[in-house]
Image (spheres, rainbow, N blue to C red):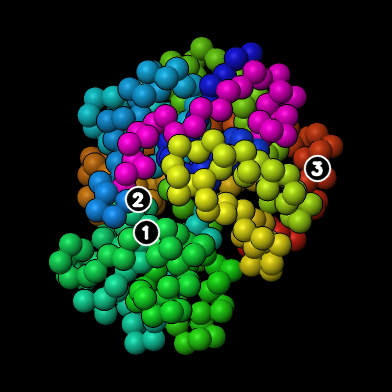
């Protein structure tokens, strides 16, 4: 059964789960002839990461590019995109499951900064303008009366804003505040830095489904079996990726292939999976993928309210709109079947300490 699946963002990390499932043979084992399509949705967004580059924005690009390139499933659409597309009259996209369902990150600031209100004239570490971190910071700045374009300085670039790397310039005094992945939070706190916001704690117990997996309404109606097979393979992959150090060598193999073929030069150079250090292993076992593939309706409702307040999602979006857009039925059927297999039962037993440690 033929299926084309891709990612909405140009970063190699955003196609990593798909590529892992493909290389591990999970899709083939579930009876799918799957092609991984990389960086076709708004590939021009690569320029957003360049100094002075454009803001990243999927709206108006997703549906045309899915049609243009014949893509059936997209694995990392920014949540507000679906509702902004509907606002434009494009009521085609449906959320069929989760992708980035949790944020194992915290907002860390140097000593003397205890809240967002202290950021006037300060330097914010950010990868590129228009990322999910930009949107969060801009919303918080406006809430305390600060202008995101005039009252703060944006230090952009991978070295300043990648959540995995942002702790380094923060510690070196090159930035004043940044979003940092949780393994490096204790190190910064020991050095006197302040935790301003904890995404995991704030969004318990429903997570922060900021990026989701989507398909077109017509495709769902015509090919429900393909979607179920996709999810059985993908759930296995989500679990496999969090089982470290056992899966580490294979993940490095997948990374090498992605880096070689990535259209962005900077993506071909940077390390995607980290190393075998304590922090590196924590990064992998705390990956944000949902164990069962599902997206929380309550998590979507709460996050859309945040996006509405920030002017990122249309103010007209209601709970009934969200319930219409979120289609958990097929991923739930896939989970009911795959959770009974010996492989997934072993995975869940192995992952139980990880789930208890991170809360998801």
The answer to whether residue 274 is left or right of residue 80 is right
Q: Nearer the viewer, residue 212 or 303?
A: 212
First in sequence: mark 1 or mark 2? Answer: 2
Query: Which residue is at a point 27% across and 30% down the rendered structure image?
Result: 60
| Cα distance between the residues tagged 1 and 2 | 6 Å
Q: Nearer the viewer, residue 95 or 133?
A: 133
First in sequence: mark 3 or mark 2? Answer: 2
Read off the residue under disc 2: 49
The answer to whether residue 192 is left or right of residue 117 is right
Where is residue 135, by image quadrant? bottom left
**Secondary structure under the numbered disc 1 in the rendered image:** loop
First in sequence: mark 3 or mark 1? Answer: 1
Query: Which residue is at a point 45% across and 49% down the rendered structure image?
Result: 266
Mark 2 neighbour density, 10 Å: few (under 14) some (14–19) many (20 or more): many
Indicate the position of residue 216 as horizontal and vertical percent values.
Answer: 43, 22
* Residue 348 part of the magenta-drawn span: no
Q: Nearer the viewer, residue 310 or 165?
A: 165
User: Looking at the image, do the residues carrying marks 1 and 2 touch, with CB atoms under 8 Å apart?
Assistant: yes
Numbered label tally: 3
| Cα distance between the residues tagged 3 and 2 | 41 Å
Indicate the position of residue 35 as horizontal and vertical percent values.
Answer: 58, 23
* As drawn, 259 above or below 118: above
Mark identifier at residue 345: 3
The residues colored magenta run 21-48
Read off the residue under disc 1: 157
Where is residue 173, by image quadrant? bottom left
Instruction: Say if residue 321 shows up in the picture.
Output: no
Look at the image and tell me in which quarter the C terminus lies. bottom right
Indicate the position of residue 324 as horizontal and vertical percent values.
Answer: 40, 30
* As drawn, 68 above or below 189: above
**Secondary structure under the numbered disc 3 in the rendered image:** helix
Mark identifier at residue 36: none
């Amino acid at each position: 059964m033929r299926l084309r699946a891709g990612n909405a963002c140009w970063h190699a990390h955003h196609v990593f789960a798909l590529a892992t499932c493909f290389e591990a043979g999970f899709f083939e084992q579930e009876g799918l002839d799957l092609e991984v399509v990389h960086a076709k949705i708004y590939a021009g967004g690569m320029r957003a990461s360049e100094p002075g580059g454009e803001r990243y924005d999927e709206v108006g690009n997703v549906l045309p590019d899915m049609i243009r390139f014949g893509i059936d499933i997209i694995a990392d659409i920014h949540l507000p995109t679906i509702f902004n597309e509907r606002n434009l009259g494009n009521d085609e996209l449906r959320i069929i499951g989760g992708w980035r369902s949790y944020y194992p990150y915290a907002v860390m600031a140097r000593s003397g900064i205890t809240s967002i209100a202290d950021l006037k004239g300060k330097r914010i570490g950010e990868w590129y303008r228009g990322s999910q971190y930009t949107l969060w910071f801009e919303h918080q700045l406006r809430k305390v009366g600060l202008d995101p374009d005039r009252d703060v300085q944006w230090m952009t670039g991978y070295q300043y804003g990648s959540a995995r790397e942002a702790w380094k310039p923060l510690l070196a005094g090159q930035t004043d505040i940044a979003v940092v992945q949780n393994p490096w939070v204790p190190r910064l706190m020991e050095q006197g830095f302040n935790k301003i916001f904890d995404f995991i704690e704030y969004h318990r117990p429903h997570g922060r489904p900021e990026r989701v997996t989507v398909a077109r309404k017509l495709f769902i109606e015509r090919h429900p079996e393909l979607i179920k097979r996709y999810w059985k393979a993908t759930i296995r992959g989500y679990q496999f990726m969090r089982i470290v150090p056992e899966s580490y060598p294979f993940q490095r193999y997948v990374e090498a292939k992605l880096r070689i073929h990535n259209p962005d030069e900077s993506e071909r150079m940077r390390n995607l999976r980290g190393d075998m250090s304590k922090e590196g292993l924590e990064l992998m076992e705390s990956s944000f993928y949902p164990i069962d593939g599902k997206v929380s309706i309550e998590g979507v409702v709460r996050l859309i309210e945040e996006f509405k307040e920030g002017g990122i999602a249309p103010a007209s979006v209601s709970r009934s709109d969200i319930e219409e857009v979120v289609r958990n039925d097929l991923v739930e059927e896939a989970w009911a079947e795959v959770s009974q297999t010996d492989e997934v039962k072993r995975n869940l037993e192995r992952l139980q300490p990880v789930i208890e440690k991170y809360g998801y």
